[in-house]
Image: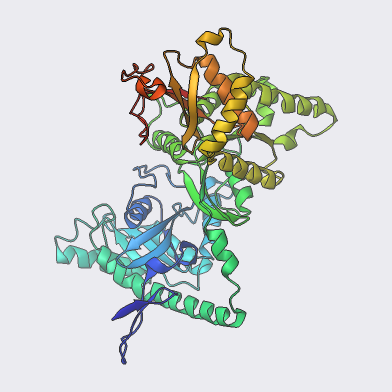
Amino acid sequence: MLQNDNRGFCTSSSKNPPPKLLDFTKIEISRLPTVIILGRPNVGKSALFNRLIRRREALVYNTPNDHVTRDIREGVAKLGHLRFRVLDSAGLEAEATSGSILHRTASFTANVLSNSHSLLFLTDGRAGLHPLDQEVGKWLRRNAPQIKPILVMNKSESLFDSDDSLASAANEMSRLGFGDPIAISAETGLGMHGLFLSLKPVLEDYMLRFLNDESAQENSCGDETSSAEVDESKLPLQLAIVGRPNVGKSTLLNTLLQEERVLVGPEAGLTRDAIRTQFEFQGRTIYLVDTAGWLQRTKLEKGASSLSIMQSRKSLLRAHIIALVLDADEIVNAKRSMKHAEVVIARRAVEEGRGLVVIVNKMDLLRGKNKSSSYEQILEAVQHEIQTIIPQVTGIPVVFISALEGRGRTTVLHQVIDTYEKWCTRLSTARLNRWLKKVMSRHSWKDQAAQPKIKYFTQVKARPPTFVAFVSGKTKLSDTDIRFLTKSLKDDFDLGGIPIRIMQRAIAKKDAGGSSKSSHPIGRVTERVKSDKRDRGDLVESKA
């Protein structure tokens, strides 16, 4: 009989147990081994990455004269019973010009490679052995002598039909000096079992050594791990960094992570993939997404640029909190805080019910005697303009930072977490109805007879906070009344800076005054709320 122990092993309870089987699903993601995919450009690294994580997340586009992937993208791979962290890298060109994007990506990849446990050297079986493959092989021997590459020959679907063709291509690739290649097709999934058999002993051996070392440390340290369990109980926060090109989004991500995680530079549109990574801050798990520069998609946008735009929009919809990054220097020169693209992002975030934090970056460019007045103007103007553009949400937080100098990191994270906690707020019905009595008494009604009768007020969901006002009689809450209730909720419960939704429901007359007649629905039907004590009614939704 097999039983799971607390380290992720499956062990047998019989007297003569078989060798321990490693259950990777029991191991935390942060402890899994890391496998990086390397190779020259356009051999299918991103396609293999998507195949391993079992979803189309990395951009895949045939660009012989350009390179779609520029940053290191991370995901959790599932191959048989194996689980590991897989990294998709930019194409390597050993002879790239010093200072060019390709040269910087190669240097960046070398730094990441030093922390990897295994690597897949990917080649193109359809094109055969290429001189760049040999250059990549030399580069690997120089930069990763401690890792034995697993040679993989991609795009081999046409070679599987002929044993002679497959053997001939494999013999050619073996000249790289890394053993016989594993023939696969990342596009169709052919050959993945062979890749599994090659990775299995490497990854299991690493995890066995890691878990044995960890077990020895736990025995020497006693039971001092209880605090970690408490920290892990906190819900993860999804944060997306968005903005126009070249405002410092990638620099901000590196600053928040306190490591060089994505490629940065003066070129606009350097980031193409939406890079998703995870880190811990004060016991809370934060999933961070750096998106490509937000542009309006036009007919002229084709290929990888068009795919980047669509991916950025999807990232915004998946996030809990949106960090909209502005350029302080551009604000001074343009004499306005937000351009059209930034207004679109801010309004889209509010419409989708997401929390919004505005970050004004590059404040270091405004230091000095000649720019002190500009510095002061920005501090006042940005908040005022945001409130004008999005009047329905008051108190949107604005943080002024210099990502390049690392100033403002802690302030940004504290503000993001504070906005997230407000976004997740839940208030009890009893507390809300005590509040309702006080707030209704201080509202000035033009006609007391026409005053809507709110029987009770309750919260039906969080993320964002959504409330329902149960109204009796023919008079419904006007837009002015809803704005008043929204403002009172934000002021009295400290919910400023997040979208709040208030809906109203008509109560049947028999519930309000004992009559058997039912009232007509109030306004447009948008949602139905179930109640055991009252009949069903219709809702009118107002977003604030």
Q: Is residue 282 left or right of residue 199?
A: right
Q: Quadrant of residue 331?
A: top right
Q: Residue at x 57, y 27 (%)?
A: 436
8 or 33, which is in the foreground? 8
393 or 524, which is in the foreground? 524
Q: Which quarter of the image is occupied by the N terminus?
A: bottom left
Q: Is residue 243 visible?
A: no
43 or 441, which is in the foreground? 441
Residue 93, x across and y down, in percent: 47, 54
Q: Is residue 164 visible?
A: yes
Residue 226, x across and y down, in percent: 57, 69
Q: Residue at x 44, y 75 (%)?
A: 6
Q: Is residue 210 left or right of residue 167?
A: right
Q: Is residue 533 left or right of residue 341?
A: left
Q: Quadrant of residue 385?
A: top right
In the image, is residue 322 above or below residue 128? Answer: above
In the picture as drawn, the residue positioned furthest to the front comes out as 514
